[in-house]
Amino acid sequence: MKIKSENGITNVDVIVSVILLTLFVTIIATIIYTINTNSTSMERKTEATNYAINEIESLKAQDFANLQDTDETTNEFIDITDENGKTTGYSKKITITDYANLPGNGQAVSGLVKKVTVEIAYKNGGNIETVDLSTVITK
């Protein structure tokens, strides 16, 4: 009896290699999608943080007497526009409160310290996310 040498590829070899290739491509595509989604999310959050920092810096540059307390019940988000007047997709809400009016500070002297909170809202995917930064400005 002579045993034939097998030269070539069988159908089973082809099917196994196609399945492995499909799994590999699926895993790589999922990893790339996740990295891209996380990167975009981080970019949006960084941009929102930059807007908040810029707002706080501009408030610090103002005269303390011009910082008027805001009423939280009527305070609403305002769209942020770029230098050309186009909306950026970010909104801001600035809350200024005299430190003496904060809960637990009944003995504090009014008009010396103000707490400034800047809240930046943006859309990330289907969700609305916010970045809050607070600081204290003194007279």
Image: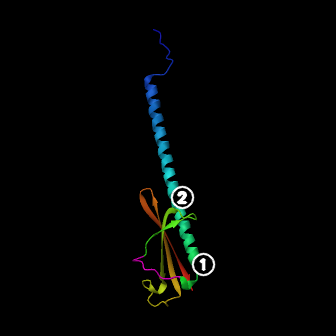
Please provide the residue range marked out in magenta.
67-74
Q: Which mark is residue 61?
A: 1
- The kind of secondary structure element at disc 2 is helix
Q: Position of residue 29 (x, y in %)?
A: 48, 43
- Identify the main secondary structure in magenta: loop
Q: Which residue is mark 2?
A: 43
Residue furthest to the top in view is 1
Q: Residue at x 58, y 83 (%)?
A: 63
Name the amino acid, label 2.
Answer: Glu
Q: Secondary structure at mark 1?
A: helix
Residue 93, x across and y down, in percent: 47, 72
Q: Indicate the amino acid at tag 1.
A: Ala
Please tell me which residue is depicted at 46% across the width and 34% down the height of the picture. 20
Residue 97 is situated, as x and y percent measured from the top left of the image, at: 47, 81
Check residue 103 for magenta coloring.
Answer: no
Are the residues flagged by discs 1 and 2 in contact, CB closer than 8 Å? Answer: no
Identified at 45% across, 38% down, the residue is 23
Q: Please give the name of the residue rendered at 54% of the width and 64% of the height, measured from the top-left corner.
A: 85
Q: Earlier in the sequence, mark 1 or mark 2?
A: 2
Foreground pick, 48 / 34: 48
Q: Residue 134, image x and y in percent? A: 51, 75
Is 71 magenta? The answer is yes
Quadrant (top left/top right/bottom left/bottom right) for the N terminus = top left
- Quadrant location of the C terminus? bottom right
Label 2: how many Cα within 10 Å (few below 14, some 14–19, many 20+): few
Mark 1, other Cα within 10 Å: few <14 / some 14–19 / many ≥20: few
Marks 1 and 2 sit apart, C-alpha to C-alpha, by: 27 Å
